[in-house]
Amino acid sequence: MPFLMNAWYVAAWADELKPDVIISRRILDLPIALFRRSDGRPAAILDRCPHRFAPLSAGRVKDDAIACGYHGLAFDGEGRCVANPHGPVLRNAAIAAWPVHDAHRATWIWMGDRDRADPALIPDLSYLDDAPDTAFSAGQLLSGAGQYEIFVDNIMDLSHTDFLHPTTLGGGAVTSARQDIEEAPNHIDVTWYSPDTPPAPLLRELFDDLPASTDSFQKVRWYAPSVMRLIAATVESGQPEETALANTNAHIMTPETSTSTHYFFAATRNYRVDDAALNERIATTRARIFATEDKPMIENVQARMGDAEFWSLKPLLLPIDAASVRVRRRLKALIDREAAGG
């Protein structure tokens, strides 16, 4: 399965990468060792010692380098051999290293051409930076079975919430919603607008005084290859959207292999932002929904697909698939153009 190489992928949440900690993570089917240097800058190198192929992540951080736990050779954040307990430093023993950058509470990695790794190309998730800790939460599902594009489809087509999450996020409103799609050079937007519908069950649990009839807006912005901002807003019917109760979420899919995905998610909101207990309740509920409903379903989809390519199975396309189809086609065009040297 070809991947888009010249793009930023989330490798970890930034607070995972603590001093003296090495994180081993497979990204785009390559083993990566992530660590922090003494000045706080993240680093990413191949998680395989060139000597006897031991995982460097089984070693330790020492002097801004990783010392292999097998025979002690050390490699810095640029992949250079900087220590050899058995003789002279081996200058020709360099290993692969990738540009990494902290932004929006995450650590991002660029897997392609180093000269094109511009941090300005990281998708704008600045709303995560602005959120107070009492109105911010983040989580992840690592090594989820399923192609990352299946996970992307899951967010681009929110009608699934009415059926997969009927007692929390769904309730029937999205399936009947009007769907508007807009394409821009660096993103694709889809909006699901549902007027005069009951609020979602989860909102009814959180608020005793919600009106019986509300207008809801679900807005998703996709950035290639697999970063999405999702705004879910609810307001009393007929009232301005600006007065809505809104949750702004990030859904980020990083391919682990061709059939498994690291799923990073985060959220903030514009109501009761100082309520830490509410924040914990929402975070716990969301993590449970993803782990017990979305993840098993996507795993089952992958199992039924097997190793087949998505379009080769001739999927039945419905109007609800319009946004996800555009995303798949845009992504394929980017990958094809990159492969052709564009």
Image (cartoon, rainbow, N blue to C red):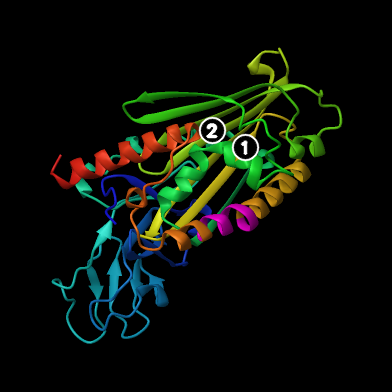
- Callout 1: 10 Å neighbours few (<14), some, many (20+)? many
Considering depth in this image, is 191 or 125 the residue closer to the camera? Answer: 191
The residue located at (48%, 28%) in the rendering is: 190
Helix, strand or loop status at disc 1: strand
- In what quadrant of the picture does the C terminus appear? top left
Q: Position of residue 312 (x, y in %)?
A: 32, 51
Q: Position of residue 182 (x, y in %)?
A: 41, 23
CB atoms at circles 2 and 1 under 8 Å apart? yes
The residue located at (41%, 44%) in the rendering is: 226
Residue 95 as seen in the image, left or right of residue 133: left
| Quarter of the image where one finds residue 123 | top left
Q: Mark 2 and mark 1: span between their CA atoms?
A: 8 Å
Magenta range is: 291-299
Q: Position of residue 23 (x, y in %)?
A: 44, 65
Considering depth in this image, is 267 or 323 the residue closer to the camera? Answer: 323
Q: Disc 2 designates what residue?
A: 127
Q: Position of residue 110 (x, y in %)?
A: 31, 50
Residue 335 as seen in the image, left or right of residue 253: left
- In what quadrant of the picture does the N terminus appear? bottom left
Looking at the picture, which amino acid does disc 1 mark? Answer: Thr
The residue located at (86%, 32%) in the rendering is: 208
Q: Disc 1 designates what residue?
A: 268
Residue 108 colored in magenta in the image: no
Looking at the picture, which amino acid does disc 2 mark? Answer: Tyr
Q: Is residue 219 visible?
A: yes
Instruction: Name the mark on residue 26.
Output: none
Q: Main structural element of the magenta stretch: helix, strand or loop?
A: helix
Considering depth in this image, is 77 or 134 the residue closer to the camera? Answer: 134
